[in-house]
Amino acid sequence: MQVTKLELGPYNNNVYIIANERTGESVVVDASFDAAQIAAATAGTTVRAILLTHGDGDHIDALEDLKARLGVPVGIHPADAARLPTPPDFLLNDGESFAVGDESMRIIHTPGHTPGCVCFHFGDTLIAGDTLFPGGPGATRGDKERFAQIIASIRDKLYLLPDETLVRPGHGADTTIGTERPHLQEWIERGW
């Protein structure tokens, strides 16, 4: 599957268009800042859905406009569903797959940054949302319980993936599982 990355807005949010090159079907991951630019980036594909990594405002601020432009359903994890301006069309549950043409992405629930954070894994790619970045986990806003959750999400779910897995985060540059794996204990010691 082909991944197109858009960097949008004042927080440099990454929005991803994931397209199946054989079937021409695609999904949009996250809806940040500029619905018109996101919709334009889907040209030449048949968009099937908008999938949200979580419900923080900077990841959903263009959602209503984008949904109206694309006319597609919206999915989010149940734990973040109430954060949307209107109810989602479907829910993204841990371990389920979401089809993009004849390919699919596995949904990985990674609570910590928010209760309903999810990542999407396909091939050698992980769309990580705000769970894992180059140099550490996503923010937990000084909450020890949430910090413990995000560390467990990374250690027990994401670090099961191969080292060469490309991590495409919700903001900033890409990394790999292998680059980040050796630093887990440093992050724990650094704490929340």
Image (cartoon, rainbow, N blue to C red):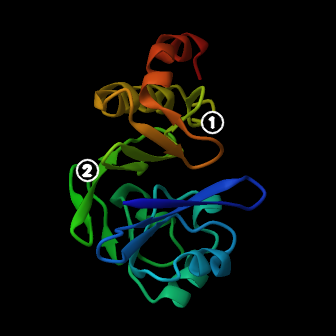
Front position in the image: 163 or 92: 163
Against 5, residue 94 (above or below) is above
Front position in the image: 92 or 119: 119
Numbered disc in front, either 2 or 1: 2
Q: Which mark is residue 94?
A: 2
Q: Which mark is residue 141?
A: 1
Q: Residue at x 48, y 79 (%)?
A: 86
Circle 2: element type? loop
Spot occupied by residue 75 in the image (x, y as percentages of width and height):
37, 69
Q: Mark 2: which amino acid?
A: Asp
Quadrant occupied by the C terminus:
top right
Q: Mark 1: which amino acid?
A: Arg
Q: Residue at x 63, y 47 (%)?
A: 171
Mark 2 or 1, nearer chain start: 2
Spot occupied by residue 26 in the image (x, y as percentages of width and height):
39, 73
Q: Residue at x 31, y 66 (%)?
A: 91
Circle 1: element type? loop
Does residue 74 appear in this view? no
